[in-house]
Amino acid sequence: MNESQIAALVSENERLKAELNEVRASSNQYLQNVAHQLTAPLGAIKWSIEALKDPQVPIGRKSNLLSSIYSQATILVHLIKNFALMSNLEADLELGQFREKPEPIDMMRLAINLANDFQPQASERGNKIVVAESTFHKVFGSKKLAIEKNLVAQAISNLLENAVKYADSRETINLLAQADDRTVSIVVESKGIPISDEEKRNIFARGFRGAAARQKVAAGTGIGLYLASRVMKLHQGAIHVDAQGRISRFALEFPRPKLK
Amino acid sequence: MSPKKHTILFVDDEPMFTEPLRLVLEAKGFNCVSLTDMSAAVDFLDSNEVSVLVSDIMMPSGEAFPGIDSSETGFHFVSLVREEFPDVRVICLSVIGDQTKIEKLKRQGALYLRKGETPLETAAKLIETKATGVINF
């Protein structure tokens, strides 16, 4: 081996070391972030329970605490599901197959159930989630969509959760269905922080959070949209974002043959 | 001074922590106000007498203070309050664990409480003590 080959190996070794350190640092940061995301709702639940136990707090004001406990528990369940999905999804994608067999699902029912799940969180900020039922009737009629329900439910939930977090207060969040010749889509539409063209390009990358998103809400794992995009890939579909000014639309697009 | 004369200002974009505290302190007779960003809080401090400020660290800065990363807002806010409203007693309520940052807050005279870890009753009593100057444990 001559000197220049050795020098090349040394520099390659240095590069790999630096890369490894970078990966370590980012996974450390990710873990810290995860721990924080899980601790915060639990802490809030603890404090709400303590306030519930306080005999001086009037009964009439305690119902808010119960709603808050309920939304914090919903947030926790949702988060934990996301983390659990993370590893499974990557394995499924590598194999190119589903863990659970896709089944025909009534999409309007699913949409209504998910909207109901997030309604308490939405109403804390004066927002409301509206399922445009007529669009579901028009797109699906009596047909169902062959999907892995838990995965798609989680993808839709991630879109709803973002909409609730980043919408302007007192705005309506719309959940609707649309179709063209080749695809059927579930769309979450809301008015809130704007998304730049630059951000649109990166928004589905793992760990990405937009500048305005970070300014509005400090906490966030940056995996919600990434997971949604992986779920759609597994369904041979796609995820799209369309944003103009403060209106943004996220669409989960399924190939039409899944309509059954 | 009776608790009714004291206003406690809560600044936090996540009401899930401040709401239980607020209920307990209101039951004790304090006047409580909740705001969700730094700009609104500074506005309020400009025109109201506040005994104790209970502020989050990671929160939006709002329109009057653009360009502040939301993970750092509270540090800017505490410095500003120390400068412009030196009579207001400051308690930071957050989840940050970085000791150097916590030390900095303490040097600025702020009391630091960790959300959800300090028992609610203790947190309420500490706020009460800061407001009235009377230790009532």
Image: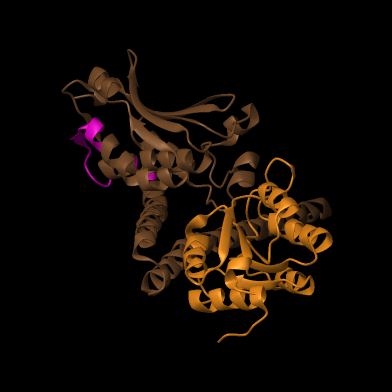
Image vertical order of residue B5 relative to residue B130, above or below: above
Image vertical order of residue A165 relative to residue B104, above or below: above
The C terminus of chain A - image quarter: top left
Residue that lies at the very extreme toward the left in this rendered image: A142
The N terminus of chain A - image quarter: bottom right
Identify the chain drawn in brown: A
- Residue B23 percent across, percent down from the top left: 47, 65
Of A99 and A66, nearer the camera is A66
- Residue A152 percent across, percent down from the top left: 32, 39
In the rendered image of the structure, the colour used to display chain B is orange
Report if residue A104 lies within the magenta region: yes
Q: Residue at the location (58% across, 30% down)?
A: A200
Is residue B20 in view from this perspective?
yes
Residue that lies at the very extreme toward the top in this rendered image: A181
Q: Residue at the location (58% across, 57% down)?
A: B33
Q: In the drawing, does residue A107 fall left or right of residue A170?
A: left
- Residue A220 percent across, percent down from the top left: 54, 51
